[in-house]
Amino acid sequence: MTNQRPIKTVGDVVAQHLCTSCGACAGVCPEEAVGMALTRFGILAPVIDHDRCTICGLCVQVCPGHSFDFVAQHNRIHGTLPEHVALGPCLEVYTGYTRDEEILRVSQSGGAVSTILLFCIEKGLIDGAVVTRWQKEKPLVAETYIARTREAVLAATGSKYNPVAAAESLRTLLATPGRFAFVGTSCQIQAMRKAELIYPELSDKIALYLGLHCLGVFTYHFHGQVLHKVGLGHEQVAYFRQRDKVWRGWPCDMRIVDKQGRVFDIDAKQSRLDPRSFFTAWRCQLCFDKANEFCDLSFGDCRIASMHALHARNGHDLLKGLSEFVVRTERARGIIGQLIGGDRMVLEPADSDAIARSIGVAGKKLGLNTFPSVARMFRLGIPAYGVRFAVAGKRHSRRSRLAALWDVIASAYWCYVYLLLQYGWFRRAVMRIPHAWIWSFTRRSGRRVEWVEHGADSRLRMVSENRWEGDGSGGFSE
């Protein structure tokens, strides 16, 4: 998969709708000629000051939007390609929750990320962590900062399902003494990994990458959509959490509080699940890395029924939340070993295939067989990864080719809705559509990618880009 047009600056990345909103370009520019701004498509994207830009190319070198060398980065970071093609590098997998009741109460799931960050800070393993929170004065706007205290870490709990320019912190990290953890989505961590090739000292400065399992982010148009449903304007919002335990516990619902103190609790299905297909950023459909393979530890909500039952039998109230995570590097395994030996978390080993199914990574990777075709239909850019994914042992029949064609046709609306939402008249029209109707349309479209169990998490194979091997043996082939 390659781009159709040459890329000289990140302006070309934006023009091809390949920008991930990670912000690395703004953080790396030596002339500070790149800034991040909200676009009419509802994402954050770089804006170039052409009077200051020298076209040095650094912004393109760190950009994960147009390309990411899957094979080279795995070999550099992990020393080999992953044995578990769906899940990625996997030394150990766990489910569990923190024993700290305050963290458990304010966290999105089991409080694992916050507990590990605070443990590392207290033990002197890091001097702080790059995290993201909603701004206090502008609760619908996310900001990234370095947290050094318990209060600062807890202020960042909960996911921000919107574009965040977390990798813009590159500039601050390089100029700040100390060692840090970095918490981010897959594209943000990919950007940091690409930056390590330019700034080798960054590899030592980032002591730990904590990755979030990510299906994709909502465009900022989603805020207008959900606020319209409750009858509020942006300026009336005093508190906003896309997932909050206060109303009904984990796995959380949306909570909005206005400046008059009125509380709006919105069912998860109505608030974020049903309308997802209309408000997911387009570039997220072209991402293969839902499980955040290039970090040290990756985290998400535990959706494994057997692990729910196990923790419940052991006395845990599931309404308080439960996390799952994957240990990907030796330095991360050392930290988890210390946590297991202490009393900060309750952890249970889990099965890697079960974790892969819980995350749904096979469907995300198989989406690379669908969405590039959609991108070609709309004459948009296609990222270069150097690999593609297939189900091991699967033979291509006429029926499967017809099904693949239907996948492309049925998935095209994810793109044209994204493109149409740049227009105010279309956004106003969508505001009047019940979210249940949106989900019904998504379900009836017959789309298989990501939404239907493929049953291929342990049988996924990786092959060179544009090289499809027919022997079904699996693995990577040059």
Image (cartoon, rainbow, N blue to C red):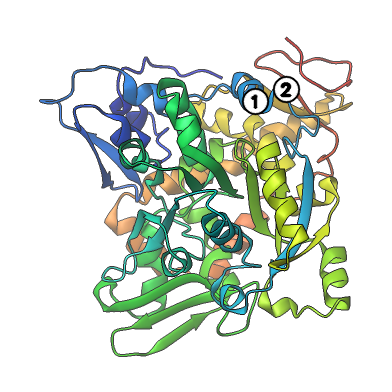
- Does 421 sit above or below residue 158? above
Residue 175 vs residue 73, the one in the foreground = 175
Q: Report the front residue among 290 and 452.
A: 290
Give the residue drawn at x 87%, y 69%: 310
Amino acid bearing label 2: Thr
Q: Where is residue 424? Give x, y as percent.
A: 28, 57
Measuring from the top left, give residue 151's x and y in whole percent. 43, 70
Is the Cβ of the residue at disc 1 closer than 8 Å to that at disc 2? Answer: yes
Using the numbered discs, state the Cα–Cα distance from disc 1 to disc 2 in whole angstroms. 6 Å
Location of residue 279 in the rendering, given as x and y in whole percent from the top left corner: 46, 55
Position of residue 259 in the picture relative to residue 354 (left or right): left
Please identify the residue farthest to the top as the structure is shown: 478
Q: Which residue is mark 2?
A: 80
Q: Secondary structure at mark 1?
A: helix
Instruction: Choose the circle earlier in sequence order: 1 or 2.
Output: 1
Residue type, numbered disc 1:
His
Q: Is residue 381 visible?
A: no
Q: At 36% across and 23% down in the image, what residue appears?
A: 60
User: What kind of element bears circle 2?
Assistant: loop
- Above-or-below relation of 249 to 283: below
> What residue is rendered at 66% in x and 14% in y?
466
- Mark 2, other Cα within 10 Å: few <14 / some 14–19 / many ≥20: few
Between 465 and 449, the one nearer to me in the picture: 465
Is residue 126 placed above or below 470 in the rendered structure? below
The residue at which mark 1 appears reads as 74
**Furthest-bottom residue in this view:** 261
Furthest residue toward front:
124
